[in-house]
Amino acid sequence: MSGAFRPDMRRAEAGDLLATAFGKAGFEDCRLMARRLLADALRVEPGELFLHPDRLIGETAERLGPALSRALKGEPLTRIAGRRSFCGRDFRVTPDVLDPRPETELLVEEMLKRLAGQRAPRLLDLGTGSGAIILTLLAEIPEATGVAVDLSPAALAVAGGNAEALGVAGRVAFHHGDLFAGLAGPFDAILSNPPYIPSADLAGLELAVRDFDPPLALDGGPDGLAFYRRIAGEARAFLMPGGWLGVELGAGQSESVIALMEAAGFQDMAIRYDLAGHARHLLGRG
């Protein structure tokens, strides 16, 4: 398909060709996928395609064929573009980090509500990956500071680059370690989107997750609760009195995680649901 795109091809024509290829391959929303892929390749916002459909794609023709081939094999468009929009900001993503999902934006929104009025909260993000959670909070709370932890040095490098791009690098420390190991509290809020997929379920995940998200960010142990147990058991020792803990949840895990947090002494717990009606986040006060 790489030879099908020419520098003298108009954007509208290239979009039609992409949509046809996605349609023949059985993808839903083939027009939407075509617009996103073309916009990413052109490095413009999707709305630009509607405003200037007759502009030529130029040197982008060289990138479109390979990008389409990757997409037809099931690679997420965000992976192909190497970036993900999260809470209105662009984050670089690589194979070393979890691709931040829109659902995780709700965790940031809920924590912002709880931190409202605090002048300079100190934040901790466990398993930071791309840094989407903590860096967004730092961008929204100008006097906040934080620590971002990850077991992967490569992930920390990605998060560090995102911090620089967002202008918050001076307010975040990156720590290579295993959850709380080597950290010094206290923190006003601890957040985490931990690995929560039961180990036996990894092979059956949808291709876009199984083949393109790092296993380190997915594998939650035999029952998917390994990291919740550790976070529940240690978090209060690192929280200010009355500080907040917020975690993302896997499917069907809310009752089990609530029980772990209750046993650890957390109070004022609340479940937040995503747009599909799934229990997605748990927040509680230490």
Image (spheres, rainbow, N blue to C red):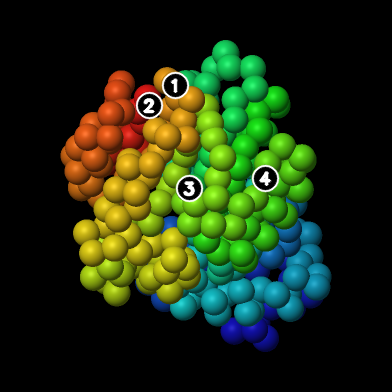
Residue occupying the point 48% across, 21% down: 113
Percent of width and height locating residue 72: 48, 76
Q: Amino acid at mark 4?
A: Ala
Residue 56, which numbered label?
Answer: none
Residue 284, visible in the rendered structure: yes
Work out whether mark 3 precedes mark 4 in sequence or the reverse, and give the earlier one: 4
Residue 134, given in percent of the width and then of the height, sits at 58, 40
Amino acid type indicated by mark 3: Phe
Q: What amino acid is found at the position of numbered circle 2 in the picture?
A: Gly
Where does residue 46 sit, x and y in percent of width and height?
Answer: 64, 50
**Could you tell me which secondary element the residue under label 3 belongs to?**
loop
Determine whether the residue tagged by mark 2 lies in a helix, strand or loop. Answer: loop
Q: CA distance from mark 3 to mark 1?
A: 18 Å
Q: CA distance from mark 3 to mark 2?
A: 16 Å
Q: Which residue is mark 1?
A: 241
Q: Earlier in the sequence, mark 3 or mark 2?
A: 3
The span from disc 3 to disc 4 (Cα, nearest Å) is 14 Å
At a point 62% along the width and 66% down the height, the residue shown is 154
Lateral position of residue 25 relative to residue 139, left or right: left
Decide: few, some or many residues near mark 4? Use Cα within 10 Å; few <14, some 14-19, many ≥20. few
The quarter in which the C terminus is drawn is top left
Q: Name the residue tied to disc 2.
A: 286
Identified by mark 1, the residue type is: Pro
Residue wearing tag 3? 180
The circle drawn on residue 173 is 4
Quarter of the image containing the N terminus? bottom right
Q: Earlier in the sequence, mark 4 or mark 1?
A: 4
Quarter of the image where one finds residue 110: top left
What is the distance, in whole Å, between disc 4 and disc 2 at their CAs?
23 Å
Q: Give coordinates of residue 109: x percent, y percent.
A: 49, 30
Q: Earlier in the sequence, mark 1 or mark 2?
A: 1
Q: Is residue 219 above or below residue 238?
A: below
